[in-house]
Amino acid sequence: MKHIRLFLIVLLVGLLCFTLISCNRSSKSADKLYLYNWTYYTPDELVAKFKKETGIEIIIDNFASNEEMFAKVMAGGAEGYDIIFPSSDYTSIMINHDLVQELDHSLLPNLKYISPTVVEKADYDPGLKYHVPYFMGSSGIAVNTSRVPFEYERTWAIFADQRMAGRMTFLDDMREVMGAALKHLGYSGNTTDERELDEATALIIDEWKPNIVKFDSESFGKAFSRGEFWVVHSYPENVFAELPEEMWENVDFFIPPEGGMMYIDNMVIPKGAKNVENAHKFMNFIHDPKNYAVFLDEFDFPPTTNTGAEKYMENDAFFFTDKDLVNSDLNDDLGEHLDLYNARWQKIRYEH
Amino acid sequence: MKKAMRPAKREQLLGTLYSFPMGIWFTVFFTVPLAIIILYSFMKRGLYGGVEKAFTLEAYRQMINPSFAKVLVRTLWISMLSTILCVLIAIPVGYAMAKSRHQTLLLFLIIIPFWTNSLIRIYAWISILSTEGFLNSLLIRLGIVKEGLHLIYNNGSVILVLVYMYLPFAILPLFTTIDKFDFFLLDAARDLGATKLESIVKVMFPNIKSGLSTAFIFTFIPIFGAYTVPLLVGGKDSTMIGNIIVDQVSKTRNWPLASAFSMILTLVSLIGVFWMLASAQKEATGKKQNTLQAYEQKVKAHHGRSRR
Amino acid sequence: MNHHTYSKKKRPSFSNTMLILTILFLFVPLFVVTFFSFNSAKGMQWEHASLIWYKTLIFDSPSLWLAFRNSIIIALTSSVTATVLGSLAAIGITWYRFKGRSYITTISYLPMVLPEVIIGISMLIFFSSVKIRLGMFTIFVAHTTFNLPFVFMMVQARLDEFDYSTIEAARDLGANERQALVKVVIPAIMPAILSSFLMCTTMSLEDFVITFFVSGPGSGTLPLYVYSMIRYGVSPVINALSFVMILGTMLIAFTFRRFLKTAAASA
């Protein structure tokens, strides 16, 4: 009997811990908004402003890649989120998988500011029924000109330049790197032609990979600002965020003229979100030109996505403009054909 | 004898009552997840992650492929080398700690870095080893080198940091076993004419076998499954199995392949553990033969022979 | 133990030299981090001493403090649960024979030795297939799971050394079984219980890989935060944070210094 009592006590303690944790999570969610966004993509200033204006507290979790985000979504780990920020290909995947809710446009008057170019490129969801574009941008190449004081080619061919061997990095991202090689060869970044893919693979393995030190999506910004890496395939905001402003003049950032892979990051409301109304409020809030200008200034982004924001911006020197993106491709959802890429990426990353 | 005092039924009840909660916990949160992984490795991959309910050996077929073989071989030699280095360093360190009068202080000093956040320690190594980092600026200032050396983003830096991270895993069990060892035996062996090294190798090592195998396994297994170290301080050719598994889940969305690789890691770990347990068992039964007497006889025989 | 040295030489022995070098090796990164946490410049060049990064850390890092809170909640709840369940199981396994005993002994070994990546992935897949939402609860479960084996082993080791006749004596003096447990056994194994609790807390505060897989909305822990800082953050704040964490670790270890040896024996 006594042992049974002891056992019950233990059980009780366990239950207590359990409820403690679950209470902690579910209490008063009415004035909350859970975002699942890319790392460092939501300015603190806007989070604070949003709270001041609406009383809604924003809780943000971060992901570093669409795949990581989607793995969590498929694993049921995204159920608590109210807005998720997938890129274009994953937006279409999520729409096709019936994972997102239809939007109520009457709550989103600021959609009128969204640039028509972006709406046109977003062929996966005409009329923005399910998504609101957040930002259209692109990866590119950042060169530290204090370390590379000589002439170099301002195209993807820079990675074949042996003078910078051991000081260059690629993003650890299959579509970005293979897309770069495909575009450099004049093909589509979404090709499913095996011959073209083989050609791109050979280019990377024979010409580019020998000169790079690492495939790095994690800490290239820091290593670049330290002077460790001289030429990085990167997203400009990550690079410039790490650099003190007096060093900016030593950085040459460009999107190769042959084009590369661009992206549009979107906002979607997953099915089962608890704070749908708050989510709409936030989507509308962010596209108020004044607020959107704060977002752009925070990361020194060019105004590619919101037509009203430019006049409120402090920054007027942009790393790139929409014009640099004319030759770039968006990642399409390739479905089963993705395996063509996977197989070759394995060879690039692990074998050679 | 204590067991005989209780009726079997009561034993069954009490034992179950006490151990039941942990048993259930492990079954639900450990055995079942592992079983699911085994199951997943035999299923067809879902195009967008997850699995489809169809039996296939596809994952294992995909595994047999020169790219992965290369990573497997690399993982094996990196883990072997790092583990051997760890154990080789840990033996004299454990020995010195066991003989020291300041054991608590020394343990404190070993455990502090060990308990410091591992990412922070990796981060520190990055700032030490960078071409523009701490070590290189020191070398340049001292005039030893002219230009920063490439010390990071290669397999050498991976091994260095792995040894750094897992050294305490080797030191602690070795210290514990050497601490229990009776140092009189060493003195006795030396009285019998053995050199210091001889006495350590022939008298002490047989007695600390279980510590050695524990140190080896506890270092090897986590290194074999390492993920963050090769990711952060490795170069373009430093990928290890742990990275492939994570990539398959978070990038390629190939859950069955990730599961199949996990199976390999699990199997290697299990073999290691059973080897460790078996060697501990053998030591327990064979201990008596390793006593001083046996050694004394050996030494006497040896000396006797050489004198004649 | 009698540490009888055979011969005394002036020259430090090989093993002592190795010991000193190893401790230096283990501490080098900690020194470097501490040094740069007081650097006013952002990069690796030393400018002058400054506490600016500590100021940022304390007054200007709300999400860090949220992560810290999560870490503490999880470390405490999972350690308490693991300590209670593990100690009870150790008592049951050591003193009673029953069906399922060998299953529990074997299974309790494995989480300790399997690579973290495997535990993380298997738990992620498990939670997703039984549709448990990822969050604080799943991290709590995962941490308890990897903590349990340590408690179990440490308490069991202590019980093995325990002299059973003291219980018999207590029973002879009229104590019932529960009284014997509470008044004799638990005080005797208290050092093991405390040191395993300590181990659990530190391991839980430190874990990154497993937490990375099973975390969900709003449940980021301190190591996850550190990871995102290493990827993109402003580096000197990491240094400041690291130094604070090193101090914290030293404080914990110092408080529990009596139990360090027990803790070491199980690792």
Image (spheres, rainbow, N blue to C red):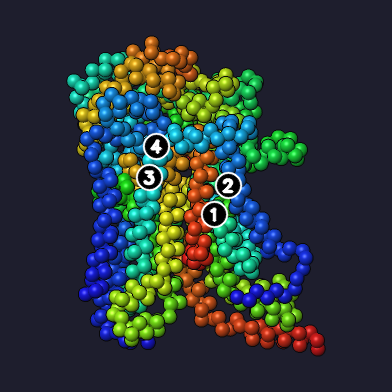
The quadrant of the picture occupied by the C terminus of chain B is bottom right
- Asked if both marks, 3 and 2, belong to the same chain, the answer given is yes
Q: Are marks 1 and 2 in contact (CB under 8 Å)?
A: yes
Q: What residue did someone put label 3 on?
A: C69
The quadrant of the picture occupied by the N terminus of chain B is bottom left
Which residue is farthest front?
C173
The residues tagged by marks 4 and 1 sit, at their Cα atoms, a distance apart of: 26 Å
Chain assignment, label 2: C
SS for dot 4: helix
Instruction: Tell me the amino acid under the disc marked 1.
Output: Ile
Question: Between A145 and C184, which is closer to the camera in this rendering?
Answer: C184
State the image coordinates of residue C163 (x, y, percent, origin top left).
Answer: 43, 80
Q: What residue did someone put label 4 on?
A: C63
The residues tagged by marks 3 and 4 sit, at their Cα atoms, a distance apart of: 10 Å
Circle 4 Cα neighbour tier, 10 Å, few/some/many (<14 / 14–19 / ≥20): some
The residues tagged by marks 4 and 2 sit, at their Cα atoms, a distance apart of: 24 Å
